Image (cartoon, helix red, strand yellow):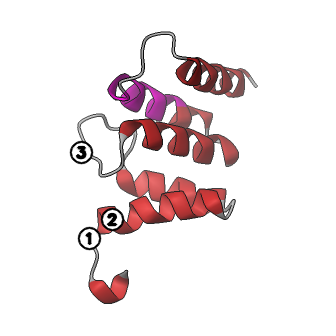
């Protein structure tokens, strides 16, 4: 990607998903930080439904439940998932449990 001068947002999006695929959660969390997923005003390349799942997995995987909560709050309303959707309920429960520790 760097040979083709891909924009930083494209590289970070690919690194987020690649980090998760390789179970390199630290790299995935750093990519999520570069994407500024906790800021609801920042436009994203990935669909919110993908980004919220990926960011929360990365943040919880590296022990950053506060970042996971902020990502959930910023992205979950944009997913288009119905209120009470089981995926969002599970994500919210995982984040809540991590915050209680």
**Residues under numbered marks 1 and 3 in contact, where contact means CB atoms less than 8 Å apart:** no
Where residue 13 sits in the image (x, y, percent)? 41, 59
Disc 1/disc 3 C-alpha distance (Å): 14 Å
Q: Nearer the viewer, residue 38 or 57?
A: 57
Disc 3/disc 2 C-alpha distance (Å): 12 Å
**Residues under numbered marks 3 and 2 in contact, where contact means CB atoms less than 8 Å apart:** no
Query: Mark 2: few, some, or many residues within 10 Å (few <14, many ≥20)?
Result: some
- Residue pointed to by mark 3: 43
Magenta span? 69-79
Residue at 65% across / 40% down in the picture? Answer: 60
- Residue pointed to by mark 1: 7
Which residue extends farthest bottom?
3
Where residue 31 sits in the image (x, y, percent)? 47, 59
Query: Mark 3: few, some, or many residues within 10 Å (few <14, many ≥20)?
Result: few
- Check disc 3 and report its element: helix, strand or loop: loop
Q: Nearer the viewer, residue 39 or 56?
A: 56
Residue at 64% across / 20% down in the picture? Answer: 96
Residue 1 included in the magenta stretch of the image: no
Q: Quadrant of the N terminus?
A: bottom left
Disc 2/disc 1 C-alpha distance (Å): 5 Å
- Whichever of labels 1 and 3 marks the residue nearer the N terminus, that label is 1
- Check disc 1 and report its element: helix, strand or loop: loop
**Residues under numbered marks 2 and 1 in contact, where contact means CB atoms less than 8 Å apart:** yes
- Whichever of labels 3 and 2 marks the residue nearer the N terminus, that label is 2
- Residue pointed to by mark 2: 10
Question: As drawn, is 44 to the left or to the right of 95?
Answer: left
Residue 73 included in the magenta stretch of the image: yes
């Amino acid at each position: 990607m760097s040979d083709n001068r891909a924009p930083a947002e494209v590289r970070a999006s690919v690194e987020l998903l690649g980090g998760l695929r390789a179970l390199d959660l630290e790299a995935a969390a750093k990519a999520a930080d570069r994407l500024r997923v906790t800021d609801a005003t920042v436009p994203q390349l990935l669909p919110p439904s993908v980004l919220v799942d990926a960011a929360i997995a990365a943040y919880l995987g590296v022990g950053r439940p506060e970042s996971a909560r902020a990502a959930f709050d910023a992205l979950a309303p944009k997913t288009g998932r119905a209120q009470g959707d089981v995926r969002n309920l599970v994500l919210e429960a995982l984040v809540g449990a991590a915050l209680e520790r």
